[in-house]
Image (cartoon, grey):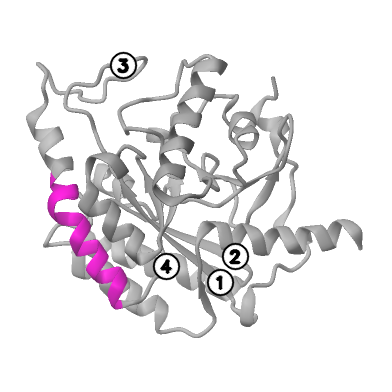
Amino acid sequence: MIALHERLDYSAMPERAPLAWPGGARLALWVAPNIEHYEYLPQQVRVRDPWPRVPHPDILGYGLRDYGNRVGVWRLMEVFDRYRLPCTVSLSLAVLDMYPDIAEAMLKRGWEFMSHGLYNTRYHWGMGEDEERAAIAECQAIHRRHTGRSLTGWFSPAASNTVRTPDLVAEAGMSYLCDLYHDDQPTPIHVRQGELFSLPYSMEINDSIAWRRGMEAEAFAQKIRDEFDTLYAEGGRVMNIAVHPFIMGQPHRIEHLAQALDYILGHSGVWCATGAEIIDCYRQQAAHWTHS
């Protein structure tokens, strides 16, 4: 078994070869709406209770998240349409079967789907290798049935990855993983077989974390702008914005997100891309560095 610290080679940012984005862009931006389903009464609860309020069911917790799939997601879609943003959905794959209206809307927009597990209440912590492999395969099967294509990316449900997750994701044929939060650029991950890259996913520019810290939308939007200013000035970086329909899709928050996007996209040299596009661009350059 490969330990986490053995999966990544250390690389100091100032010593790296310059990373270039298409058209001379200074920054690669990928936006990840987390479109999830939380089970009303989860069957699998290992080391964490998805609904900490007792007794169950947690009507408040469930209802708030259900609001996201009934109302909030459509507000997010309107904003992303306004800016013609390509999106990479951190998706509970069950959503494709459970919410046909949402599935149709995402497919119509050509959004990329990154697996966020089956449900956001089915944690992978504590799974054995065969059980986790089967869970990943189930997500692949649902994705193929709806899109005719294989998944390219993985982000474990509720960030509940195991030490084997990178190996199993690579084994399943995916090219990128968002379970690691260690860099502003893609990095190779050592796996037992195949090839896998880490795509920078943010737990800082993430409305779920901000919400849990008591940060409201205006401050979160300013945080987005501040993050952008630094990464844009440095150049050759990846910026991720992670949002949830039940949080940023609320009526009192949505325009703060729109204003932050308006600020970012008011700058030239911002490459709005999907996760797979960013990894493909990085892979091509990394191959050149290896052979030069």
The residue that disc 3 covers is 45
Instruction: Name the residue type under label 4.
Output: Pro
Mark 1 element type? strand
Label of residue 86 in the image:
4
| Residue range highlighted in magenta | 67-82
Horizontal and vertical percent for residue 205? Answer: 39, 55
Instruction: Name the residue type under label 3.
Output: Val
Query: In the rendered image of this protein, does residue 115 appear above or below residue 21?
Result: above
The residue that disc 2 covers is 237
Structural distance between the alpha carbons of marks 4 and 2: 18 Å
Identified at 29% across, 52% down, the residue is 103
Q: Are marks 2 and 1 in contact (CB under 8 Å)?
A: yes
Q: Is 31 or 236 nearer to us in this picture?
A: 31
Structural distance between the alpha carbons of marks 3 and 2: 38 Å
Residue 181 visible in the current orientation:
yes
In this rendering, would 23 be left or right of 54?
A: right
Q: Is 167 or 60 nearer to us in this picture?
A: 167
Mark 4 element type? loop
10 Å crowding of disc 1: few (<14), some (14-19), many (20+): many
Could you say which quadrant of the image residue 286 lies in?
bottom right
Of discs 4 and 1, which sits in the foreground? 4
Identified at 51% across, 69% down, the residue is 230
Q: Is 123 or 98 nearer to us in this picture?
A: 98
